[in-house]
Amino acid sequence: MAEAVKKQGIKEFITSIPYNKIGLKDLMSFEKTPRNIIIAVITFAFLVSFAVGVALYLMHGHHSYNVTREHPWGLLIAVYIFFVVSSTGLCIVGSLGDVFGYKEYEMISKRAIFGSIVTIIAGFAVIAFEIGHPVTMLIYNVLTPGFTSAIWWMGTLYGLYLTFMIIEFVFLLKHDMRMARIFGLTGLLVGLAAHSNLGGVFGFLNARTISNGVFYPTYFILTAFITGIFIAFIMMGIRYRLSFPENAKKMLTNLAKIQGLLIAILIFFVTWKMLTDIYGGMPNRSEVALHILGSWTFWAEVVLAMAIPLLIILKSKGSAIHAMFWASLGGMVGVFFMRYNLVHDTQLKPLQMMKVREYQLAPEWVHYFPSAAEIMISLGGLGLCILLYYVGTKLFNLDAETH
């Protein structure tokens, strides 16, 4: 009897979640402006490319990727990190209102939390075709947990994080702010733990001195918040078509000021990271750092994700929100290069072979460029992210409501 009542309570809870009944006609009913049509066509093309990339992977396995024993982590790892960093950042932004109680940020809470769910799902969709056997992984993740493995903790914590984010979003939809705050705070703490642990995956690489150490666990949290603010500007810019109401202007101005501080701290961090890597000429670290400084992708990261947004914020004191919208679009491109550089630069220097007594050729830099399958799956992840977010805007009311 008690079990039947419990089941009835769960069913009633689920059926009472507010949502809009939509069909295919509703999804196709967007305003047919040239911009919207271009976005729709690009999204569809990305989804098709995802299907083709997955088909290539299923036919040829990892041979469809350009990863090697010398460069085992490729574009899909970088894109996965890109999405989960975005998810953690949106979680932080969403928590400003519903968890920490800052009223001016409540207008973006539901939108940011839903965005955190969408981005991590996209990340999981991409990484599923990198790890080889995702179903087997889920089974043995429970049956034979690897408590000493940072990657095991990463997967487990992100799974818990996604669960808490979904529950928090449901309570936000039901306007139960007390429960939303409880699950939001829990999800935020688990998400920060998962994300710093993801940085630890790189920090624990003793054989790769360029990344080994405590830098990346803290760097990941900082860049997640920066990424979340970039996406917040993009979300609100699209929502209001750059015609922001006064409360949105106030919120975005405050976010821009926070962003300026965060980017300044990031520049400080990266500068000292490079100086300590180069200083002393430590083998396998200093030459890699110098090689990184000579790459155009590093400077794309610096210019797009750091210099341009910071200059706009400093010049306008955070009030140039239209300029920040466009800078945020460029900033997300810079964040992608930030993730790609993180993965690729870690593997630039080939490891020493075990046959130290035999003649070896002088090691060269490890070269890598993503294959067509990797690029298509990565673009498909972006297409999936855009599609899910669009469906969410139709299915749920993501705007703040007054009660």
Image (cartoon, rainbow, N blue to C red):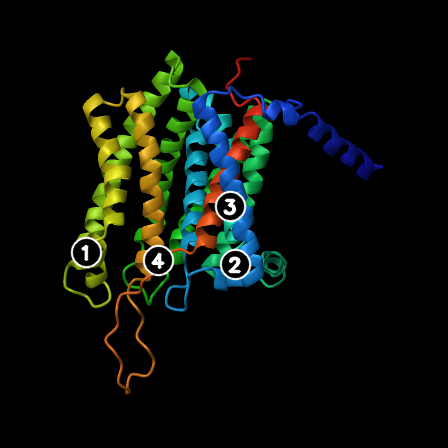
**Quadrant housing the C terminus:** top right
Question: Mark 4–mark 2 contact, CB under 8 Å?
Answer: no
Spatial CA distance of label 2 from label 3 is 20 Å
Residue carrying label 1: 276
Tell me which amino acid carries mark 2: Ile
The answer to whether residue 161 is visible is no
- In the image, what residue type sits under mark 4? Gly
Residue 281 horizontal/vertical position (percent):
15, 64
Q: Amino acid at mark 1?
A: Thr
In percent of the image, x 64 and y 27: which residue is there? Answer: 24
Q: Determine the secondary structure under disc 2.
A: loop
| Residue 247 point in image, percent of width and height | 39, 14
- Which disc is residue 49 wearing? 3
- Between discs 4 and 2, the one toward the N terminus: 2
> Between tags 2 and 3, which lies in front?
3
Q: Mark 1 or 2 closer to N-term?
A: 2
Amino acid type for the residue under numbered disc 3: Ser
Q: Residues within 10 Å of mark 1 (few under 14, many from 20)?
A: some
Q: In terms of secondary structure, where does tag 4 sit?
A: helix
Q: Nearer the viewer, mark 3 or mark 1?
A: 3
